[in-house]
Image (cartoon, rainbow, N blue to C red):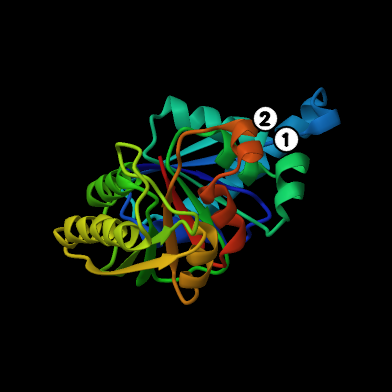
C-alpha cells in the first residue's frame, strides 16, 4: 500500500502521519512538504532557508514511523502545498492521500481554502482526513448509500485491511420520502427497510470474510444525521465518494463532504 502524507510545520507531533500508520500497514510512504513563500518567491536566500527547514522537518517526520514502514521517500519543493500534494499523489499512483483538518467551518474551508479542503475536493484518490489525537482504530463505522458504494468500500477494505482487528458497524439510512426499485416502482416503507437490510447484510458478510467483526444498523432518516449519531464513540468513519470534484462537489453537496465536517473522528473517503 502506497500512501502520500502532507507534512506541515504546524503539526509538530506529526499526528497526521502517525494516525495513517496506526490505521493501515503501508509498504511505502511519501512525505510531502511544500515551501510556500508567497510574495518572497524571488528571494533565493528565503528559498534556501525554507528548503533546509523542510528537509529537517521531513527527516524528523520519517524518524517517527521508520520502524513501521519499509520505504519512506520525501518530496520537499517550493510550491503551493495543496498543488504539490495533489500532483505527487497522481504521479505516484498512490492508494491513499492523508491530510488533516483544524476544524474550520464548511464555508471558510471551501472558500478561504485550507490545504486539506483543496486536496479533499480535488483528488481522485481515496483520502484519509485525520481529526483529533492519534488513536488506535478499534471501532469503525461504515456508511453505505447503495450497492455501488458498498461494493467500492468492501473491495477497498479487503484490498487494504486495517492494521489491527476492529469491530465494524455497517449502516444505511432509509430516505423518509421513500425510494424506488430498479424499475421505477415506489417501495413501501417495509419494502424499503427490507431492501436496506439486505444491502447492509451483504456488505457485512463480505467484510466478515476478511476477519472483521461486523454488525449492521438500518434506520429511517437522512444519511448525514444517522452517520453523525452512529459515529459517536467510533475511531474511524468510512464513506464513499461519488466522484464529483472541485466546486461541483461543494455546490451539489455530498454525504462524504458533510461527514468530514460533522463527525469528531477521522474519516476515510473511498474513491
Question: How far from the left and from the top, in percent, is residue 48?
Answer: 71, 32
Q: Secondary structure at mark 1?
A: loop
Q: Are marks 1 and 2 in contact (CB under 8 Å)?
A: yes
Q: Quadrant of residue 250?
A: top right
Whether residue 78 can be seen here: yes
Quadrant of the image for the N terminus?
top left
Question: How far from the left and from the top, in percent, is residue 88?
Answer: 50, 30
User: Could you say which is closer to the camera, residue 240 or residue 118?
Assistant: 240
Quadrant of the image for the C terminus?
top left
Whether residue 34 can be seen here: no
Q: Is residue 52 above or below residue 92?
A: below
Q: Residue furthest right?
A: 39
Q: Is residue 261 above or below residue 31?
A: below
| Lateral position of residue 251 relative to residue 193, left or right | right
**Residue in view at x 60 percent, y 49 percent:** 57
Which residue position is annotated with label 1? 36
**Residue in view at x 63 percent, y 44 percent:** 117
Question: How far from the left and from the top, in percent, is residue 84?
Answer: 59, 31
User: Could you say which is closer to the camera, residue 135 or residue 171?
Assistant: 171
Q: Whole-Å distance between the Cαs marked 1 and 2?
A: 6 Å
User: Could you say which is closer to the camera, residue 128 or residue 143?
Assistant: 143
First along the sequence among labels 1 and 2: 1
**Residue in view at x 49 percent, y 59 percent:** 176
Question: How far from the left and from the top, in percent, is residue 19?
Answer: 46, 61
Q: Residue furthest bottom?
A: 233
Which residue position is annotated with label 2? 78
Q: Quadrant of residue 114?
A: top right
Q: Secondary structure at mark 2?
A: loop
| Lateral position of residue 77 relative to residue 193, left or right | right
**Residue in view at x 57 percent, y 33 percent:** 122
Amino acid at each position: 500500500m502506497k500512501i502520500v502524507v502532507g507534512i506541515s510545520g504546524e503539526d509538530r507531533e506529526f499526528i497526521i502521519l502517525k494516525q495513517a500508520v496506526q490505521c493501515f500497514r503501508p509498504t511505502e510512504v511519501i512525505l510531502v512538504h511544500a515551501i510556500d513563500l508567497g510574495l518572497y518567491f524571488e528571494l533565493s536566500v528565503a528559498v534556501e532557508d525554507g528548503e533546509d527547514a523542510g528537509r529537517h522537518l521531513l527527516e524528523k517526520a520519517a524518524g517517527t514511523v521508520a520502524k513501521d514502514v519499509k520505504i519512506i521517500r520525501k518530496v520537499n519543493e517550493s510550491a503551493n502545498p495543496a498543488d504539490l500534494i495533489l500532483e505527487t499523489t497522481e504521479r505516484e499512483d498512490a492508494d491513499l492521500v492523508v491530510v488533516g483538518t483544524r476544524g474550520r467551518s464548511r464555508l471558510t474551508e471551501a472558500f478561504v481554502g485550507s490545504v486539506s479542503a483543496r486536496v479533499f475536493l480535488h483528488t481522485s484518490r481515496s483520502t484519509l482526513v485525520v481529526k483529533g489525537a492519534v488513536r488506535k482504530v478499534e471501532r469503525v463505522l461504515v456508511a453505505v448509500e447503495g450497492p455501488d458504494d458498498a461494493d467500492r468500500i468492501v473491495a477497498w477494505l479487503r484490498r487494504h485491511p486495517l492494521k489491527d482487528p476492529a469491530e465494524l458497524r455497517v449502516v444505511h439510512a432509509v430516505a423518509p420520502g421513500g425510494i424506488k426499485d430498479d424499475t421505477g416502482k415506489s417501495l413501501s416503507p417495509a419494502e424499503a427497510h427490507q431492501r436496506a437490510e439486505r444491502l447492509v447484510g451483504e456488505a457485512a458478510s463480505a467484510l466478515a470474510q476478511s476477519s472483521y467483526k461486523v454488525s449492521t444498523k438500518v434506520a429511517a432518516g437522512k444519511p448525514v444525521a444517522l452517520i453523525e449519531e452512529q459515529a459517536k464513540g467510533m475511531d474511524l468513519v468510512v464513506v464513499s465518494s461519488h466522484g464529483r470534484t472541485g466546486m461541483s462537489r461543494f455546490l451539489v453537496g455530498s454525504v462524504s463532504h458533510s461527514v468530514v465536517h460533522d463527525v469528531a473522528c477521522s474519516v476515510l473517503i473511498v474513491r
